[in-house]
Image: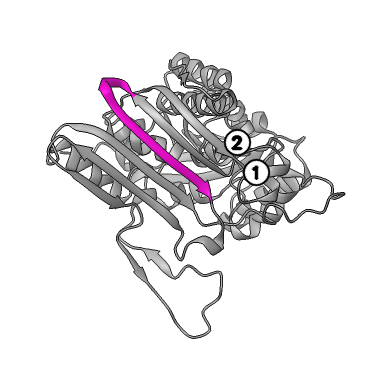
Amino acid sequence: MKTTDREQKPFNVGVLSVVKHDYLPRAIAAHPRFNLSFVTDEISRPDWTHERNQKFANEFEIPYIKGIDKALSENKIDAVAVSPEAERHCDLAVIAAEAGLHIVIDKPLSTKLKECDRLIDAIEKNKVTCLVWNRNYLPSLIQANNKIQSKEIGKLLSLHCDFYFSKDAGPPIGSSKPNDPPINWLDRQLEAHADGSDGGVGEKAMGELEVEGIYPLAYIQMLTGGANVERVFARTKPHFHQAHHDNNVDDLATVTLEIEGGITGSLSIGRIGAASHPDIGEIKLHIIGSKGSTVISEARPEVSIYYRDQPPLEFKNRRIADDNNYLLAENFARSIDGKESPVLDCLEARNICATVQASLESSRLGKPVDVKNR
């Protein structure tokens, strides 16, 4: 097939904040179809926000422009990469959609359904595409999906995902003294930035279901062919970390899922601490079909590397053959071209947010809760 001029010309991308994680704009910058043009953020943001934005801009030798409206009006771009605190994801993405720009946005889409709906309305109105960052192109997920689509294990009946991250999140639960003040969530997240365990950065405290739940739920959504979760029953609690306890959010949860088409599902998720596992964590898929079953480790293929004077925080188990970030960027480019749909779009991520919110409500009420899908 002949490549068009449009496919040969790179897309110019503006980075709308890069204070949460920088893996998203880095992945976009590494793909030949994209060029980063600038970093921008709201002028009123606190100093630590501007410092992170400026550092990233300096590394990529692009300007940091304070004032999003100014940056968008003075630069011709095709798309934006959105990676602020989770509570600002939809705000910044709506600005981009209203400017007619395509959007790649960090996870989770939001913790509020009304914010997700506001963004979906803006995307539909302005006819732009939106990819929500995910891990669905990991080799293990591709293999799992191929097994299901090929009917190798027959009709899909049930699936379960273990999603335990062996990362610490500050002092262990029970370490506070009786008169100690509660741990401030944002202060803890800023401290955690050095080791990458600050997934819930922001003023609003976020439990593990809200921070990471989109990953296993996106796996389940893809492996069931896009079926929505209809009803959930969940148990959540702060079990490992004092910061989660003090801010009344979960670091451990289990969720049972009733899925369209009569499929049953479940997930177990937690930020279980560095001492709990020799690898990045226990992340596995258990899939049951009418003709067989399979268990797939999300980390495979991987190699283990040990050597003298190895830094204690260096991962000894390293994934190989992992093109997830490149393939996501490729999917985004082809979505802009109109040749593919995003592997996880805004509507799907919104319904995952609805599943998470229903799970938290179920845990509070102690009974099953219907999911408010759109």
Answer with left or right where residue 119 lies relative to residue 343: right
Between 207 and 368, the one lying in front of the other is 368
Between 74 and 218, the one lying in front of the other is 218
Q: Earlier in the sequence, mark 2 or mark 1?
A: 2
The span picked out in magenta is 259-271
Q: Is residue 147 visible from the viewing direction of this image?
A: yes
Q: On residue 6, which mark appears?
A: none
Answer with left or right where residue 327 lies relative to residue 279: left
* Magenta part, dominant SS: strand
The residue shown at (87%, 49%) is 179
Residue indicated by mark 1? 201
Residues packed near mark 2 inside 10 Å, few (<14), some (14 to 19) or many (20 plus): many
Q: Give the CA distance from mark 2 to mark 1.
A: 7 Å
Residue type highlighted by circle 2? Ala
Between 226 and 36, the one lying in front of the other is 226
Between 288 and 151, the one lying in front of the other is 288
SS for dot 1: loop
Q: Position of residue 324 (x, y in %)?
A: 36, 49
Residues packed near mark 1 inside 10 Å, few (<14), some (14 to 19) or many (20 plus): many
Q: Position of residue 271 (x, y in %)?
A: 54, 50
Residue indicated by mark 2? 86
Would you say the residues marked 2 and 1 are in contact, meaning their CB atoms lie under 8 Å apart?
yes
Answer whether residue 269 is magenta in the image: yes
Q: Position of residue 16 (x, y in %)?
A: 59, 38
SS for dot 2: helix
